[in-house]
Image (tube, grey):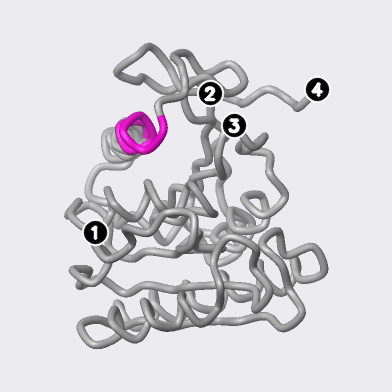
Amino acid sequence: MYPKGNLFIPASHGQLEAILKEPAGPAKGIALVCHPHPLGGGTMHNKVVFRIAAGLADAGLITLRFNFRGVGASTGVHDEIEGGTQDVRDALNYLASEYPGQPITLAGFSFGSRVGLEVGISDDRVVRLISVGSPVDKYGDYEFLTAVRKPILFVHGDSDEFGAIENLRKLYDEVAKNTDAELVVFEQCGHFFDEHLNELREAVKDWTERQINLKYS
């Protein structure tokens, strides 16, 4: 059994189970992390999601990760991308109400990146985006990301089973034409970053710290 979340946040279908973590030092903003596909066993306790959240906290952000509808103690029933995007909106609304005016970093892994990015590119409260293990082969409609005008980090394994690195590079090249984009690729690395979890945490921390410093420089 996974440990329970430390709070519930309001959702259109009832509530979302979530975990909120504060950084060790002064907060420099807030972050939302979205987990992989619920039907594949994805939860907010996923090891990749945990490392992403840890990296964001290391960078000084108050970080929220949550269970999508139908997962853990979250209410509702899984509803693919449509339901996932609504859950992301509900989580963003909670963060914005609890921390008004604070810049939000939105990160997602796999399915969480697909639904999170779709919401984040057009939500003015979100100032930067992180996509980890982007499943560009499973979801062939990532072209919407070419409209992004916010800083974005991609972290990917060169042997990712759900997104061939050459296909991600094509998307990255298009995105980078219009915004501040960065791509970090780990060699001999699959979708779940098994031997690269600490490197993933550091990559998220380093990029986020640089983005925060740019904002205040």
Q: What distance separates the C-alpha of mark 1 from that of mark 4?
A: 35 Å
Circles 2 and 3: CB atoms closer than 8 Å: no
**Sequence-wise first label, 2 or 3:** 2
**Sequence-wise first label, 3 or 1:** 3
State the count of labels: 4
56 lies left or right of 4: left
Which residue in the protein does label 4 denote? 1
Q: What distance separates the C-alpha of mark 4 from that of mark 2?
A: 15 Å
Q: Secondary structure at mark 4?
A: loop
Q: What distance separates the C-alpha of mark 3 from that of mark 1?
A: 25 Å
Instruction: Give x and y (percent) for residue 79.
Output: 40, 26
Q: At 20% across and 72% down in the image, what residue appears?
A: 149
**What amino acid is at disc 3?**
Leu
Which residue in the protein does label 3 denote? 39
Residue 82: say if magenta.
yes
Circles 4 and 2: CB atoms closer than 8 Å: no
Q: Which residues are magenta?
A: 80-87
Residue count near mark 2 (Cα–Cα under 10 Å), binned few <14, some 14–19, many ≥20: many
Q: At 67% across and 80% down in the image, what residue appears?
A: 186
**Sequence-wise first label, 1 or 4:** 4
Circles 3 and 4: CB atoms closer than 8 Å: no
Q: Quadrant of the C terminus?
A: bottom left
**What amino acid is at disc 1?**
Ile
| Magenta stretch, main secondary structure class | helix
**What amino acid is at disc 2?**
Glu
**What amino acid is at disc 4?**
Met
Q: At 57% across and 71% down in the image, what residue appears?
A: 205
Q: What distance separates the C-alpha of mark 3 from that of mark 4?
A: 17 Å
Q: Nearer the viewer, mark 4 or mark 2?
A: 4
Which residue in the protein does label 1 denote? 121
Q: Secondary structure at mark 1?
A: loop
